[in-house]
Image (tube, helix red, strand yellow):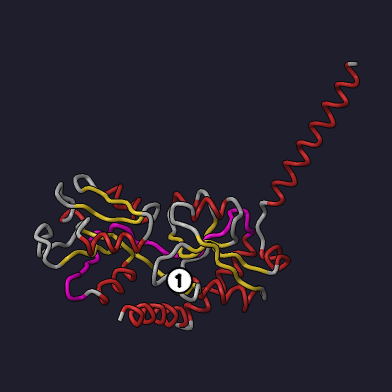
Amino acid sequence: MSNFRAIVSGLSLAATLGLAATAANAQEASWAKVQEAGTLRCGAAVYPPFVSYDPLTKEYGGLFAELCKRYATEVLGVKHEFVDTTWDNIVAGLQAGKWDMSLALNHTPQRALAVGFSDAAIPDQVSLAYKKDNAKIPADAKSFADFDKADVTVIVTSGTYMDKAVTALAKNAKILRLPSGDEARLALMSGRGDVLADPADSNMVYIAANSDWATHLVPEPAVSRQGMGLGVHRSMSHQDLQSLNFFLEELRATGQMDVMLQAAIEQILAEAN
């Protein structure tokens, strides 16, 4: 009986180890697997001008959506697919293998512990948008400290790097966390909050479309200033990451990245008008 139990235990252990090895192999991300599947899946949380979505055409646009399309077509030779997600889930979904690449993901030390990153496609920093006639905001405001008052509410999109940065800095101001960028911008417009902490490029577009009542500033010292790139599964090899980084490097060096960003901004402004 003891020998039988030993054999059964040994078989059970071998099966467990085999399943673990299979699971580990399944989690090893590579462009070869994407090419075998025939589709590059890109996790997309909407945040114009980086990622936008047209509900009428059901098409994704924006700088990082274009990067997904171009890398799929020009480098991997596959189709692309956008997977809708939120900023609260954009890292967890990548970890779980629900998509191959997360779009417009800012480089943060916390995220780097969980996922891999491409080099920065563009630099990014937080700016603070507010109503011109808001008496709570000093006319000579320059730093976040000028907004950090007990009667001021700072609006952020939940789960974003802006959320984390403002949470770390705010000592007196209230923080209003909303699930999407559209809701955050509407909250400023409706007066639910006083200040919108958003990427400078996003706020630039927002202010251009609402210049009659809104303005913004890039505070010094910076609330947050970092690169914005593409997230990949942490198991992706250095060689595969090089392919993605060389692709981005060429677009930056030839000025195509700036052209694509400007085109995304102009498209949003055209739609707003």
Instruction: Locate the N terminus and report the quarter of the image it occupies.
Output: top right
Image location (x, y in percent) of residue 133: 11, 66
Residue 223: image location, x then y, percent = 28, 57
The residue located at (34%, 64%) in the rendering is: 182
Residue kind at label 1, given as amino acid type? Pro
Q: Residues in magenta?
A: 211-237
**Is residue 215 toward the left or the right of residue 46 in the image?**
left
Quarter of the figure that contains the C terminus: bottom left
Name the residue at 86% across, 21% down: 5
Residue 234 covered by magenta stretch: yes
Q: Answer left or right for 20 relative to 9.
A: left
Q: Please say whether residue 27 is one of the residues in the magenta stretch.
A: no
Q: Is residue 95 left or right of residue 181?
A: right
Nearer the observer, 144 or 197: 197
Tell me the quarter of the picture where residue 77 sits. bottom right
Which of 32/48 is in front?
Answer: 48
Residue 21 image offset from top left, x and y in percent? 74, 44
- Residue designated by label 1: 55
Residue lying at 56% horizontally and 65% vertically, measured from the top left: 42
